[in-house]
Image: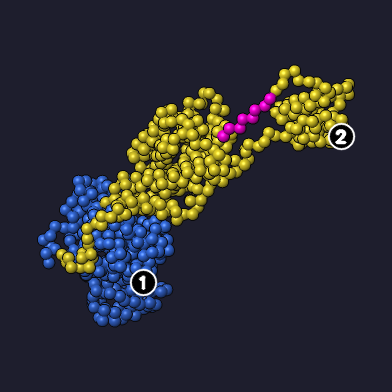
Chain colours: A yellow, B blue
Amino acid sequence: MSDASPVRRRAQAAPASFVDHPLVQLTLVRVREFTREPEAVFWAIFFPVLITVGLGIAFRSRPADVLKIAASTPQLAQALKQEPSLDVTEADPAAAATLLRTGRIALVVEPAPEGGVLYRYDDTNPEGRTARMLADHAIQRAAGRRDLVSATDAIVRDPGSRYIDFLVPGLVGLGIMSNTLWGLGFSIVDSRRRKLTKRLIATPMSRAYYLLSYAVWRMMVLVIEVGVPVGFGALAFGVPVRGRLIDLAVICILASLSFSALSLLIASRARTLEAVSGLMNLAQVPMWILSGVFFSAQRFPDTVQPFIRALPLTAVVDALRAHMLQGFGLVQLAPQLAVLAAWLVVCFGLALRLFRWK
Amino acid sequence: MAADQAPPALRVANLRKRFKDVVAVDGIDLTVRAGECFGLLGPNGAGKTTTIEICEGLTEPDGGDVEVLGLRWRSDAQALRQRLGIQLQETQLSDKLTVEETLRLFRSFFSRGPSPADVIALVQLEEKRGARVAALSGGQKQRLAVACALVGDPDLLFLDEPTTGLDPQARRQLWELIEEFKQAGRTILLTTHYMDEAERLCDELAIMDHGKVIARGTPAALVASIGADHLVELSTGGASRPVDIAALCRLEGVRDVKAENGTIRIHASELHRAVPALLEELRRQEVPVSELGTHSATLEDVFVSLTGRHLRDE
């Protein structure tokens, strides 16, 4: 044959450089497709920050609330103003009733018709009950009552026990789950839809490298996914990370791999983005609700607790909270890590059987 | 040429493939010799793509035997993939990668082959090497797809409808690229439903219809097989009287006559005798002629004479 042709002559041995290794090239594709999609970067990085800021502000630890109440006579108002935790307005009974009904005050204090004091409040409202105790205390003291036992307060406001401390590990877990499921699943289905996967398996490309490139890419994004909300939580709200960082890395890597396997399974057969979106939501919605991201999963009945604890997001969130807030190590977190490992093995095994390349 | 003694690049025997209740490939035999450009010509749905994808190892046949470069998919898949260049009909390469990044990716899968830059030059995409795939025209995308098939320095190149949907200029550019590749002594299996493409590029052709090969040979031999060098088409617009076809058939130089809804197609060997005789006969029959055209016989005419349909009816 004519080896002198321009095409033949240019044939040469494969360049051995690191960058031209197929796994590196495939991983570069993942990274490029991600970074060249600005929306994807936004959702992965800024979304957790926005949620943390928003909820952190909404649920910030305020100085002990000053309760708003109303008094119907100047004498009562004068007595109540001795109590610093109460913000007292003077109002005639009709106006005070309106304020109470619309929730702008917690309590109305007025003289009782038969002498003494009348408290109007809603006993199902904790603020109302607190205001009643404080108001009664102030009025009794103004009338000359003395305490028999002296009391001193020591205020404790520890980082680690606030809502924001509860929230940040939850958001980290939620972020790993949704970024991994959407990012990986969409990319795989989109490649299949474009018949790009079919084209790739027509080359000598190793299928293991193809799947591995997704895992490597997820590991790279994981640094951002975890680093941003944890770092932001620490800087802006003082959310602690009491466990060892290496343990945190192990938890997050295992979580990312488990969700990658789940995503691979969900995307193993879908041919359209619509189909895979539906399946993704089906898988995620129960976990959004049950896994204790925004409120404790303990609130659900005891009978469903074993089911909730078997969910991968519950395992991730519980492990992250115990690690960050209580400083638990990997040994103490073995149950959660075992749940994650089980999801990884089962989903990956099924995905390999079901995965459709064409 | 030594090519006749060399083992065939591709040998397919009694190939069968059925999808649910559709028989896509119904007992096909093919032999592609090393160094030739072999074409599968046929309308959409004839089974061309199924056949080529079985040869590419992407589809499992229901029956029959496939031998590619002397190897078999069952035992030598990895070695085969290194030696084949493949362009699929509908691949959309990643929009967000550049031309060069795409080729570097594909190049990384092969143990040998030209550098991405050389392939870019070969398909004349130098100006677009840094452009994203999304920004390429249809013809440029198709040349990139062919470039991806060339990065492994293939011994056998599969092209599945490489110019479908392209404008005439882009088609000619791709033809030149394929011709250059042919001149380098490479073996190509090409599917197409364009008869002009098959005529221009292919050394050897198999015409497919409904999963079967209905004719094979060189383009020239196939055209000659209908026994006529020329076709005369005439319209008898609004003729009230039926034309006496038998009388036309007896005319000098006329090989075959077919009439359907006001159009008469005549296979003729000698135009200078057949056309005057035809016109004289129609005048005698008092049939008005509203249109008259002649052309040299093509593969399209071969297909029409074999099936009664045009290649692009569907």
Q: Is residue A170 above or below residue B128?
A: above
Can residue A189 be seen here?
no
Give coordinates of residue B164: x percent, y percent. Answer: 35, 63
Q: Quadrant of the N terminus of chain B?
A: bottom left
Are discs 2 and 1 less than 8 Å apart at CB?
no
Q: Position of residue B295 (x, y in %)?
A: 30, 75
Secondary structure category for the residue under label 1: helix
The residue sitting at 23% across, 46% down in the picture is B63
Q: Nearer the viewer, residue B81 or B220?
A: B81
Find disc 2 in the rendering and name its residue: A92
Name the one closer to the observer, B111 or B40. B111
Q: Is residue B281 above or below residue B143?
A: below
The kind of residue on which mark 1 rests is Gln
Q: Image check: A63 left or right of B20?
A: right
**Given this view, does label 2 or label 1 mark the residue nearer the observer?**
2
Disc 2: host chain = A
Give the residue at mark 1: B169
Q: Residues within 10 Å of mark 1 (few under 14, many from 20)?
A: few
- Residue A8 in the image: above or below residue A196: below
Q: In this rendering, would A109 be left or right of B196? A: right
Identify the residue at the far top of this view: A148
Seen at 18% across and 63% down, the residue is B35
**Residues rendered magenta in the picture:** A152-159
Please tell me which residue lies in front, A210 or B84: A210
In percent of the image, x 44 and y 38: which residue is there? A245
Where is residue B44? Give x, y as percent. 34, 58
The local secondary structure at tag 2 comes to loop
